[in-house]
Each structure stands twice: as C-alpha cells, then as structure tokens.
Amino acid sequence: MTQRLMDLLLSGAELRTLIDAAEDILGNPLAFIDRNQNEPLLSKSYPQDDIEDKIYRRRNISSAEYEKDTGYVMALSLTGRPHIIAWPNIRRRRMICGSLVGGRHLGGIRLPDVGRPLEDLDPDAVTETAQILGMAMVLNGWPADTEINDGQELLFSILNQRINPPFLANRMLYLLFPEGSTYCMLWFIADSAEGLLPDLQTYCYALAENGFAALTDYQALLKNRETLDREIRSRGRLVSCSDSFPSVQEIYENFRLAQSVFQYALAAGQTEGLALFNDYRLHHMLASVSRLPDASRYLHNGIRALRDYDREKGTEYLATLRTYLDCNQNIGRTAQRLCVHKNTVFYRLGRLKSDFGLDIQDTKTLVSLYCSLWLGDIL
C-alpha cells in the first residue's frame, strides 16, 4: 500500500509531493509534526479548523496539562531507542504517529478524524507512512542541527545495531555509501584514526569499542595493499580487514569479522601491518572448529607425540616445527629465529620423519600439522 510512497521517495520527490501522496494513500489528510509539536507541512486537504482547535487548546490549558497531552512523544524521545520506529496513538479524535530516526526524535504525523474513521485506518500503513516521511526528513537534511546525516554517526549506529534492517533494506544509506561498491571493514586500535590510512579513501570512520572502525572499498584496498602495509608498519600499528561484502546491511557482521582477524593475526605473531581476512581464512575456519565439543580430536597425533617427547626429554622439536612453518619453510630464517645453526634445523627436521613418521615434504601432512598447531593454541 505504501510502496508508491517509497517509490516517490527513492525517485527524489519533494516533501510537499510526499505529504500529498501520503494523504491519497491513507485516505486522510495529515500533517508532519516537528520536534516542537509544530506542523511545518500539511497535506492538501488538512482542515484549518483542526489547526485552530489545537492553537486554542494550547492557549487555554496549563503547560503541565499540555505536556501530559504530549507526554507520549516525550517518552518516545527519551527511550533512546535508535531504530526508525513509529508509534500510533489515537487521542482527542486524532491519530498521532511519532517517529525516531537514528535515536533522535524527529517528530511524526498527525491525522485528524476527517475522511475515513481513524478506527478503520490500517495501523501498519500509518506506521510505514511515518517511517517513510521520517526518512524523507533525513534525506532532505532535516533537522539541520543534528548530525543524523553524518557518515560517522550512521556507521556508529550500524555497528551498535542501532539502525534497523528495514532502513538499510530501503537503501537510504546509499547516498553516503555508493551502490555497486565492494566494501570491507577495517578495525584498529589507535589514539586517533587520522593519518593512519593516507592512501586509502574511506567512506567513514567511527569509534568502536576500544578502537576505530572504517568502511572502505575492498578493491581499492587491494590495489594499495603494499603501500598501506608499509605505512601502517612504519607507525607500529596493526590494522585488520574483513572479507569483502556487497551491501551495507552486512557492516555489523563484517566488523566483528575484522575484530576476529585482528586476534588471529596477534596469535600468529603478526603485530604490525595490514592483516586481511584472506590471509587468515584458515584460522577463522579453525576457530569455528575449536568451538565444537570434540574439537581436540582434530589435533594431529604427531603434534601430541612431539609435545609429549619435548616435555619428557627437554627437546625443542615442536618449537622447531612451528618456527619452520611460520618462516614459510625457510631454513635460514628458522635458524636465525631459533638462534641455532642451519645444520641444527636440518637435523631436527630430519628426525621428525625418522623418529616420529612426519613427512614434512608431503603437502597434506604439512597442512594438517599447521592446522593442528594453530588449533592447539586456541583450545
């Protein structure tokens, strides 16, 4: 029923047109009420006597009584509920439907008992109409004294699940976050977000828990990955990145994913630079496995044997294997990190096969050992 109104909104119709169309759809005249209970916009057939009656009542009742009469709006505003919501309320032969957008009270709509009886109105249609007109206010920059149109505020609301799915589904945010982009979420811990990503055009930043979140284009990030990584390392910071996603509706879950990547990177020994989800996709899968009741059964028996042998004999076969894998099977780097001679590394790796039956030249064995090492760390 209100799809026509939504189509008009998406087409960029003026508020005047939307208000008149809402009257045609509902079958009743209506007024848009601002936060101060004024009616800045009236539909084409709104009765003058209703406005005069309201003015008369306001002049002839006490402030306390007036506040009581409008108390539901105040209560709605004070709840701080940050969804786009509408609250139908029939009083004094009028239906009033308040509207909150992004946690801020914007006003709502007033329908006098003219035309169709108020009892015959479809409450869902009235609610949806108030929602759409509330969105129209936001998209037209009203009210001007709030930051409701600010990208940081919107991103903050999304990250805290304070903007409901219908708002996102109606694609109101695409004015800030362009349609057709491939997004990704970044997360990092820093005193300030300024200057950390100079070669990356981010759509917006937002404070998030004990760090910063940023929404950016995934393809642009990949294109500038090496430069970004060097810049981030030069500042001694770690920035994690979620997987790519096509819709701003997926911001929240990918923000959580970026936070997980941050922890995966730290667990793997990366403390600086750019950590992409794609680099830690296996870790994410293993983290899911670790939550299974019988997760320990997935540990490679060879890892258990090396761990037990090292504890009994005081050797370092497990540490050698771990370092060898962390160094991408580079003998020189492994020896350097372990502070031993290359021959020592060759000897220990040789014994992995002769004494424990672990053929590290076999790809399947190598992958299984690597997964078991990481899984063992998080169990």
Image: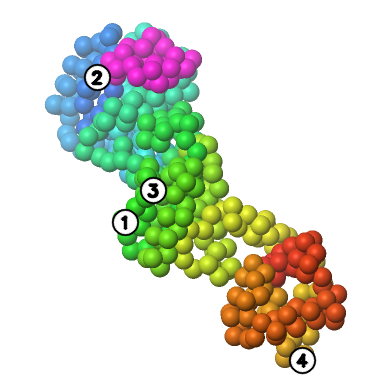
Residue 63, above or below 184: above
Dot 4 or dot 3: first in sequence order is 3
Secondary structure, mark 1, is loop
At label 4, counting other C-alpha atoms closer than 10 Å, the crowd grade (few under 14, some 14-19, many 20 or more) is few
Quadrant containing the C terminus is bottom right
Dot 3 or dot 2: first in sequence order is 2
Query: Is 261 positioned to the left or the right of 314 in the image?
Result: left
Question: Which of the pair 142/121 is nearer the observer?
Answer: 142
Label 2, on which residue? 41
Dot 2 or dot 4: first in sequence order is 2
Label 1, on which residue? 195
Label 3, on which residue? 200
Using the rendered image of the protein, determine whether residue 154 is visible from the camera's viewpoint.
Answer: yes
* Marks 2/1: CA–CA distance: 44 Å
Query: Is 47 positioned to the left or the right of 123 in the image?
Result: left
Which kind of residue does numbered mark 2 sit on?
Answer: Leu
What residue occupies the far bottom of the structure in this picture?
A: 313
Image depth: mark 2 or mark 1 in front = 1
Secondary structure, mark 4, is helix
* Marks 4/3: CA–CA distance: 52 Å
Question: What span is colored magenta in the figure?
Answer: 1-27
Residue 107, above or below 314: above
State the residue at coordinates (70%, 75%): 321
What residue occupies the far left of the structure in this picture?
A: 59
